[in-house]
Amino acid sequence: MAQFAVLIYAADSAHAPDASAEDLAEPDGHAEELVAADAMLTAYAFTPRECAVSVRRDAATPGPFVDAEHVVAGVYVLEAADLDEAVRIAATNPVVRSGGGVEVRPVHSGGVIRPPRG
């Protein structure tokens, strides 16, 4: 099966450092559904744009790299038979219903280099 990255675009990430279980119920519930369907390989939820630092040449500045209405709120990797199936799965992301969207891209190569330090 092929792998597909799903980039989640939203006004901001729901995963603030002080987010409550209630704040995260919808996105975490969706992730649990994908795990139960054996479709999700890995996932990363990013913190809100206010936590970002952008690096360009010799400068590091607070905020996201691109000042846009939507930012990348997270990314996950699906395993699917083909792009059409990956798009169908990604379309179930709750951000699609709430004014954001997702971008599905075939993964060319890569993977976990080492486990996180403990």
Image (cartoon, rainbow, N blue to C red):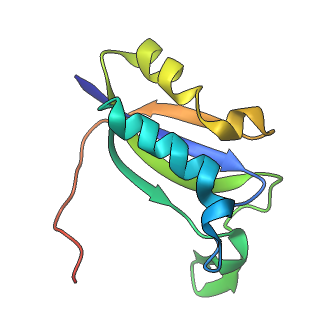
- Residue 40: x, y in percent? 35, 39
Q: How many marks?
A: 0
- Residue 2: x, y in percent? 27, 25
Report the front residue among 22 and 4: 22
Judge whether 19 appears above or below 103 on screen: below
Quarter of the image holding residue 97? Answer: top right
- Residue 76: x, y in percent? 43, 46
Judge whether 66 appears above or below 34 on screen: below
Residue 5 in sight in this render:
no
In the rendered structure, the answer to whether residue 60 lies left or right of residue 35 reads right
Quarter holding the C terminus is bottom left
Quarter holding the N terminus is top left
Quarter of the image holding residue 7? Answer: top right
- Residue 75: x, y in percent? 49, 50
Residue at far left of view: 114
Which residue is painted at 42% across and 15% down in the image?
85
Which residue is painted at 78% across and 39% down in the image?
98
In the rendered structure, the answer to whether residue 98 lies left or right of residue 94 reads right
Which residue is painted at 24% across and 48% down in the image?
110
Which residue is painted at 72% across and 61% down in the image?
66
Residue 19 in sight in this render:
yes
In the rendered structure, the answer to whether residue 50 lies left or right of residue 113 reads right
Residue at far front of view: 22
